[in-house]
């Protein structure tokens, strides 16, 4: 029992510095970059925005084309069925 207590005390003693470290304080405000920004650190925003908008428009037109093709298939099937079924009076 003494060995178990000594082992627990030893482990707790080793773990104490880990728990004693305080996290760094969060930055409260925006700090501007001092000096010139290298080209590696900048993002080509206009090109990325254009690509994103282009992708969205391609997806929208693809969805509309998909709906149109499915609707035309349904219209053909309805026309085919209406030709086969006699009209009721």
Image (tube, helix red, strand yellow):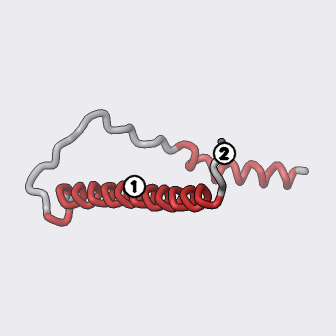
Q: Which mark is residue 64?
A: 1
Q: Is 89 on the left or on the right of 76, as rendered? A: right
- Residue 65 is situated, as x and y percent measured from the top left of the image, at 39, 60
The number of discs equals 2
Q: Distance between the residues labelled 2 and 1?
A: 36 Å
Farthest top residue in view: 28
Q: Can residue 42 be seen in this view?
A: no
Determine whether 25 is above or below 67 in the image: above
Q: Which residue is drawn at 33% across and 55% down?
A: 56
Q: Which is nearer the eye, 3 or 83?
A: 83
- Residue 57 is situated, as x and y percent measured from the top left of the image, at 31, 56
- Residue 16 is situated, as x and y percent measured from the top left of the image, at 61, 46
Residue 64 quadrant? bottom left
Q: Which residue is drawn at 17% across and 56% down?
A: 46
Q: Residue 88 carries which label?
A: 2
Q: Which mark is residue 28?
A: none
Farthest left residue in view: 36
Dot 1 surroundings within 10 Å: few (below 14), some, or many (20 or more)? Answer: few
Dot 2 surroundings within 10 Å: few (below 14), some, or many (20 or more)? Answer: few
Query: Which element type, helix, strand or loop, lies under badge 1?
Result: helix
Determine whether 40 is above or below 53 in the image: below
Q: Which is nearer the eye, 59 or 67?
A: 67
Q: Residue at x 19, y 66 (%)?
A: 40
Q: Which is nearer the eye, 41 or 61?
A: 61
Query: Which element type, helix, strand or loop, lies under badge 2?
Result: loop
């Amino acid at each position: 029992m003494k060995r178990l207590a000594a082992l627990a005390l030893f482990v707790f003693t080793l773990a104490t510095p880990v728990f004693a470290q305080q996290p760094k304080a969060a930055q409260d405000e925006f700090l501007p970059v001092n000096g010139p920004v290298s080209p590696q650190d900048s993002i080509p925003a206009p090109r990325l925005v254009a690509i994103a908008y282009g992708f969205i428009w391609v997806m929208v037109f693809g969805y509309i084309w998909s709906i149109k093709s499915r609707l035309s298939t349904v219209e053909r099937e309805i026309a085919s069925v209406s030709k086969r079924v006699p009209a009721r009076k």
